[in-house]
Image (cartoon, rainbow, N blue to C red):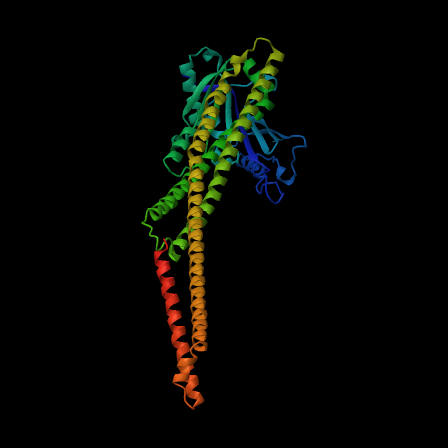
Amino acid sequence: MIEKVYAPNLHLFAFHLWKALRDDGNNRVTDANKLWQKCDEILENLHFSKRLHLEQYNFEPSENSKSLPIAEKLRYSGIPITGKVYAKCLHDSYALAFNLRRPEKENGKKTEEVSLNFLREINRNQIFLPKFVNSSLGQTLLITAFIPEEFKQSSIEDLEILAQKCLEKFIPNAQQLPPLKNQGELFGSPIFEYDNLSEINNLSEINIDSSDLHHCHILIWLFRKNQSSEDFIDCYPKFIDLFCYRNKVITDYQGSLKQYEKAFNYYSKIQGEIKSLNEFLNQEITDESFLNEADLKFLKQKLKALSQLDFTYSQTLRNLKHYRNTIVINSKNYQQTLKEIQRKLKEKSSIHSEKNLDFFSAFINEDSQYFQERIKYQLNYFVEGSTLVDRAIASIRGITEIEQTENQYRHEKREQENNYQLQIQILAVGTGMSAGGIAVSSSGLLVKKYSTDDPSMTFIISVIIWFIVAFFFYVGILGLAWIFKKKKP
């Protein structure tokens, strides 16, 4: 049973967003220097004297990378260790590569193998785990060690047990241990991958808060030969890039899960609003009262609510598409970095072949493809929500337009009716007055027959005749108009 390893190394690759697109033009995020501050906190926890102190610099992509060599002793065991803190800027992100190692040689002599407890001591306060580092773009931990000479030909099963022991020493809390996800060979030496992303995703799918469960990605690489270590050192800067793109893909996917949850909630609200609208539309509508004031108020509220929901819903779907696009971009960058590593290895030796990087290619061929397909499915599912909102808004506007047309028609009809009645009244009055005047002017004999010496009596008789004739014609005209209106279809 293997209890010791030779020249163990710990590599922390952590990444943090330092700029983002903003409306105010200030692209720098508020906690851009958080990663450098965490680096100094790690050094302080290890009781090392040196500090990176990068938070005082305006660290821009155009500047050269910065590094800090380490040569200290572990506080409790007194074991001498060396290492380097390497800080660089990758486009919109800061990258921190923090390495602690037991040197292979001291004073020109090969160092002794160390107990696996070495891994526990350097991570005594869990200072290298995601919960402490808490970088916005995630991290990858890589533990490397040389297999002791007498165990170099051990079976893969025995080496898996050794890798698990290394992990358990590094993370004593069993509940924090990520499960084994993958194992393979890299540069001729076995490598084991531990990842808890599936656990986080499962919690998200059943609506359990997973905010306290950080994504933990750990690689344990057991060197069978020196060439594996040398190849890794030669490609070290490219591995920083590779892990950066990998963690960006993971972070974008986790962001898409949050947008999915928002979209699902908005979709449920949209369905509720549409259900309420359908219940209203299913009510019986009479010609006498198509829409009353309360109905119009209800439709106005629905139109406002659906418009607001559609706006936020569309924004959420746009965010989902953004995450899908960034996953595609970073996946391509990841693939390109793999090709650059492969090219560099081929420049050293023509022996290397594509299979040397199959272990890392699995992330693109499996995980990244799954992320993209899942977001694509989500978008296809939620696009129906926008269609429903558009149809509902169109229905409301159609109903209100019908109501406006009906109101306008009723208003015009009332005006026509009023104009018709007024014209009949004018016709009846005019005809009656004219007929009365004619009757009076042509009824001289009648007036003469009843005339007296009193002129006023003669005038009264004429007025009475005029009124009777005028009233008769007035009533007659109104009667004829009423009969004509009744017969009109």
Left or right: where 142 falls relative to 443: right
Q: Is residue 53 at all visible to an observer of this figure?
A: no
Q: Is residue 466 at all visible to an observer of this figure?
A: yes
Q: Residue at x 37, y 59 (%)?
A: 484
- On screen, 258 above or below 352? below
Task: Pinpoint residue 322: horizontal percent, then vertical percent.
Answer: 52, 34
Q: Name the one closer to the observer, 376 or 94.
A: 376
Figure disc tally: 0
Residue at the far bottom: name it.
Answer: 453
Where residue 62 sits, quadrant-wise, is top right
Q: Name the one closer to the observer, 82 or 202.
A: 202
Task: Pinpoint residue 226: horizontal percent, then vertical percent.
Answer: 55, 14
Task: Pinpoint residue 243: horizontal percent, then vertical percent.
Answer: 54, 26
- On screen, 293 above or below 369? below
Residue at the far top: name it.
Answer: 351
Q: Name the one closer to the observer, 320 or 50.
A: 320
- On screen, 189 above or below 281? above
Residue at the far right: name it.
Answer: 63
Quarter of the image with the N terminus in it: top left
Q: Residue at x 42, y 12 (%)?
A: 155
Where residue 97 sits, quadrant-wise, is top right
